[in-house]
Amino acid sequence: MIKVVVADDQPLVRAGLTAMLDVEPDIEVIATAQDGTDAVEAARRLRPDVVCMDIRMPGQDGISATRQLCGPGVADPIPVLVLTTFDIDDYVFGALEAGASGFLLKDAEPAVLVAAVRSVAAGHGTLDNSITKRVLREVVTRRRTQPVTAARAADLLTARELDILLRLAEGLSNEEIAAALFLEVSTVKSHLARMMPKLGVRSRLQAAVWAYQNGVAQTGAGG
């Protein structure tokens, strides 16, 4: 059973998200919170598999709360899926830099939300398809002014891990990576499990962002 905490300052939104998730046989909303402070307290007390976190809340906002739950230096992180009505780049980057495993717009279809919760609970990341290409292009732009976390991926990764990272950055699923590299899906998962700690990331999404930030992957001109 996937245990979820829903954090949003609007009662109707909290109720709607809870209803959409609770109807699933493998998902249970174990608590709701009306701001970031309540979300952090509930998450630390109940240890959910996923926190669905709104960004704009009174008092402590969702980005600050996310940083407390899964940011750099958190010893026992709790995965966060950020939900917002806004696709503003600074919100997206704020969420990712705070350690969020996923970012989804609130107008997503219920099935997309459910799939995102399952993906984050399984250790994968998710990013709303409508903003993915723009986000990755912005990563490349910001990379010019941000410190690079590693000079070359080859210093950290094996050749096979680098192959997998490149395809991960293209947005391929585990199944698609396995097919492209003639591997078993279980083998891809094993490589990912070994690779992410080397990069200092906690999700597929953060690994993909790392690849673009460090120049390992490059976005095309189109899109």
Image (spheres, rainbow, N blue to C red):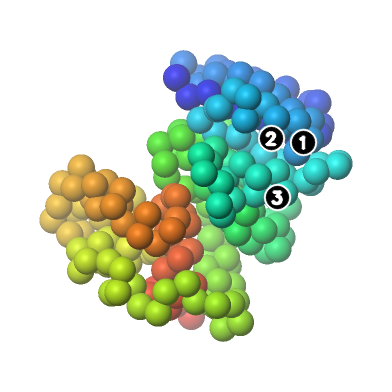
Name the kind of residue labelled 1 in the image. Thr
User: Sequence-wise, which precedes: disc 3 or disc 1?
Assistant: 1
- Furthest-left residue in this view: 182
| Residue placed under numbered mark 2 in the picture | 40
Q: Position of residue 76 (x, y in %)?
A: 51, 39
Tell me the SS state at disc 2.
helix
Tell me the SS state at disc 1.
helix
| Residue placed under numbered mark 1 in the picture | 37
Q: Are marks 2 and 1 in contact (CB under 8 Å)?
A: yes
Determine whether, in the image, residue 127 is placed left or right of residue 214: right
Name the kind of residue labelled 3 in the image. Ile
- Furthest-right residue in this view: 58
Q: Position of residue 123 (x, y in %)?
A: 42, 41
Q: Residues within 10 Å of mark 3 (few under 14, many from 20)?
A: many
2 vs 3, front mark:
2
Q: Distance from label 2 to label 1 (Cα)?
A: 5 Å
Question: Which mark, residue 63?
Answer: 3
Q: Residue at x 58, y 41 (%)?
A: 80
Q: Nearer the viewer, residue 53 or 111?
A: 53
3 vs 1, front mark:
1
Q: Residues within 10 Å of mark 1 (few under 14, many from 20)?
A: some
Q: Residue at x 57, y 65 (%)?
A: 135
Tell me the SS state at disc 3.
helix
Q: Does any portion of residue 83 appear in the rendered image?
A: no
